[in-house]
Image (cartoon, rainbow, N blue to C red):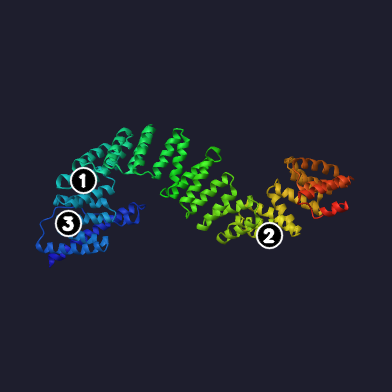
Amino acid sequence: MTRFRNIVLAACCLALVATGESQAQSSKKKKKAKAKSEQVQAPMPVPQPEPSEQEKQLSEALFLDGLKQFMLEDYKQALALFQKAYTVTPNNAALNYKLAETYLLLENPASGMPFAQAAIAQDPKNTYYYLLLAQLHTEQKQYTEAAQVYNDLMRNVPDTEQYLFHLADLYLSQSKYDDALKTYDRIEKKYGALEQLLVNRQQIYLRQKNVGKAIAEGEKLIANNPTEIRYLLAQAELYNASQKPDVAIETLNRALRVEPENPFVHLMLSDLHRQKGNHAESEKQVKQAFSSPELDIDTKVRILVDFIRQLPNPAIEGVALELVDLTIQSHPEEAKAYAVAGDLQTIVGKKDKARGNYLKAVKLDDSHFKIWQQIVLLDAELSQSDSLVLHSEQALELFPNQAIFWFYNGTGHLIEKNYEKAVKSLEHGKRLSASEPELVAQFNSQLGDGYNSLKDFKKSDEAYEAVLTFDADNEHVLNNYSYFLSLRNEQLPKAKSMAKRLVDKHPTNPTYLDTYAWVLYKMGEYDGALKHLEQAIALSEDATIVEHYGDVLFKMGKRDEAVRQWEKAKLKGEASAFIDRKIKEKKLYE
């Protein structure tokens, strides 16, 4: 009984000493991870006298308890029990193995090393002991030592040549390509010319930039696997990289004899023919590839994006448009197909068709903000204000906090003359844009128009002034603000200054010339007004400009000529509400 107590006390003392050493080391290296600081340092194996039978039984009991904790993944408790068992039977190979394995799982491979080495010394024919020691070396990036362990394993344990593959991987991890190649030679002698062996050899030759040998290995792969298309594709790439495009094309034609519809073969053929300047054949091959549903949508999108980057370019526009149509035909349920079609068609000016494809894309997947943004932008560019209102409202259901959709919604309502709704949407979007001054200015620009239409001139002027404070040369505001002031006969000198500023910057813009002329007209400066209207009419025969020209002529006493201009304005349409009375009564009405 006394002997038993002494053994337990000795084990406890060893554990305490080991823990104390670990804590002292942790305090010296505070920056280490917590898990590392709590690790228990391994006691070094020391020679021990042969244990008694009672001690062996105690050690076995401790070992079994340790195994239970190991199975429960309580590795710290398992380690403590294994250490106690070790103090009694340090020459037990299985115990040394479990100690090393437990240290490995506790992320302390260095402490596991002596135990793994001891296990091998005690049982040099056990494969698992070598594998564990190799793993411990690998965890510490000791690849040379790990490789030596595998060589020792195969020298000492019969029928373990399968670990030659592990050995080759270790050599590769150290870029020891010659050693890896020698190991592959050993593998080939044992197992023959395995497919993966040839692939690995080829990869090494490529890393060594020995394209000739890589091609030779590729031909072996093809000879052993004549129906494997990927090897033919890889070989064609190698021939092309070796400046042998004709041989590459010949190799791809071999592939087509195996799989005539393979889209990846057709894609590579397209690229090779393009390189050779054979554009007709290149287009034929790429169309054949895109016709195949086996060519995945992501690959097609990547290729189409490359086309988009080259646009506008008349030389490729036609084939690019055909490819997006083929993509949609092959993938009618893919939102990406319609989205990329919309992107390409927008760039080449097919805006109506582009918008249609964007709308199909959001029916399949409505989660993409950028697609909705493209839809409302195209609505605006196509001057379809009813669609702009509808689509912006649909977008706002999904993205209620995106100010841009409030802007387009308000703009659409403004064009549709729903001024109350317009102002409401624009004010809400403006609040969302508080941190973006440029966007706030755009909202204020539209709010100025909206409030003017509601005859809330105070708010209209405030909105315009806010824009000019941010951007004194804002064309929209300089034009509309000055024109609306002239219609109200208010602050005409200010209106004249703004309109002149605009005309000085843009002397050939008929709209700006008309605005300036109208301000001059309101101020009674008819000669100046006539001069600028004549310049405007030379550039544009817009109905409003022509009608204004008639008004100025009337004021200058040229009534018959004025009536002729009014009649011309009426024929053009979009003249004022007074145009019929002016013509009928030959009088000026404003």
The answer to which of marks 1 and 2 sits earlier in the sequence is: 1
The answer to which of marks 3 and 1 sits earlier in the sequence is: 3
Q: Nearer the viewer, residue 106 or 210?
A: 210
Q: Nearer the viewer, mark 3 or mark 1?
A: 1
Amino acid type for the residue under numbered disc 2 = Val
**Circle 1 sits on which residue?**
150
From what the image shows, is residue 336 above or below residue 281?
below
Q: Is mark 1 in CB contact (under 8 Å) with mark 2?
A: no
**Residue 87, position in %: x, y?**
17, 58
Residue 364 falls left or right of residue 411: left
- Residue 437 visible in the shown view: no
**Residue 67, position in %: x, y?**
21, 62
Amino acid type for the residue under numbered disc 1 = Tyr
Q: Secondary structure at mark 1?
A: helix
The answer to which of marks 3 and 2 sits earlier in the sequence is: 3
Q: Nearer the viewer, mark 3 or mark 2?
A: 2
**Circle 2 sits on which residue?**
423
**Circle 3 sits on which residue?**
94
Residue 315 falls left or right of residue 528: left
**Residue 221, position in %: x, y?**
28, 40
Q: Nearer the viewer, residue 564 or 427?
A: 564
Q: Secondary structure at mark 2?
A: helix
